[in-house]
Amino acid sequence: MTCKEINKNTFFEKDSSILSLLDRLNESKNLDSKGKLDCLSALFEALKEKTPVNESFKDRELQTEGLTHVKENLIKKSTALGELRYDVIYFKKQQATCYHTHPEFVIDEVFLGRLLETPIKKQDDGLYKQQNDILRRAGSTNRSFSPDGSPHRVMGLDELNVNFLLTVGNLKAEVITEVKGF
């Protein structure tokens, strides 16, 4: 299964309130992880208010065979905490993404629809093991710091499933290929 990425990462570059929050984020490098998450949360809330949702994706891009989701990248910027990305993700109904990681800091919110998230955890033998599924409904927000990149997979459950995702850190998103069941 694959992802289509659409880059629009100049979307907020002239917005003074967003630029101010990005400056604040750069100044947060000496804070603990909770302080950094607080700075990210303020940025996330400001971005969320200004983010357009393209509901026509369910009729166009998401109809492509083999596609699990479309990722619309609105910000991709180097910061003192690592690469910052802000994406709007449109998940196709009943198509799971591959297992993957994210950078260390993640804030996301299910904007429309429902998502089924399957977290995985690295075991002592180095392999990953599935954990219990988490059903996330519209309005569900996740705010986390995870040194291992919060490995998981995601599947949309409705016709239109939209997620706002803000990540920052030095870890790169990676695909995980070997996962044990329960």
Image (tube, helix red, strand yellow):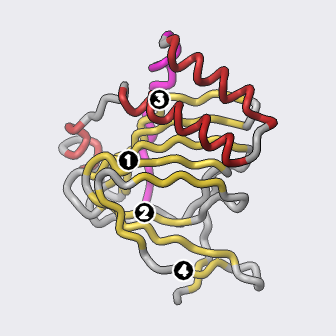
Q: Which residue is label 4 attached to? A: 130
Using the image as rendered, state which of residue 85 and residue 2 is in the foreground. 85
Q: Is residue 45 above or below residue 177?
A: above
| Tag nearer the camera, 1 or 3 | 1
Query: Residue flagged by tag 2: what amino acid is it?
Result: Val
Q: Which residue is label 2 attached to? A: 154
Mark 1 surroundings within 10 Å by alpha-carbon count, few (fewer than 14), some (14 through 19), many (20 or more): many
Query: Residue flagged by tag 1: what amino acid is it?
Result: Asn
- Which residue is the extreme one toward the right? 30
Locate the N terminus and report the quarter of the image it occupies: bottom left
Lower position in the chain sequence, tag 1 or tag 3: 3
Lower position in the chain sequence, tag 1 or tag 2: 2
Q: CA distance from mark 1 to mark 2?
A: 11 Å
Query: Residue flagged by tag 4: what amino acid is it?
Result: Gln
Mark 2 surroundings within 10 Å by alpha-carbon count, few (fewer than 14), some (14 through 19), many (20 or more): many
Query: Residue flagged by tag 3: what amino acid is it?
Result: Leu
Mark 3 surroundings within 10 Å by alpha-carbon count, few (fewer than 14), some (14 through 19), many (20 or more): many
Q: Which residue is label 3 attached to? A: 74
Residue shown at 77%/83% (left/top)?
124
Q: Which residue is label 1 attached to? A: 163
Which element type, helix, strand or loop, lies under badge 2?
strand
Q: CA distance from mark 3 to mark 4?
A: 31 Å
Q: CA distance from mark 1 to mark 3?
A: 13 Å
Residue interval drawn in magenta: 1-14
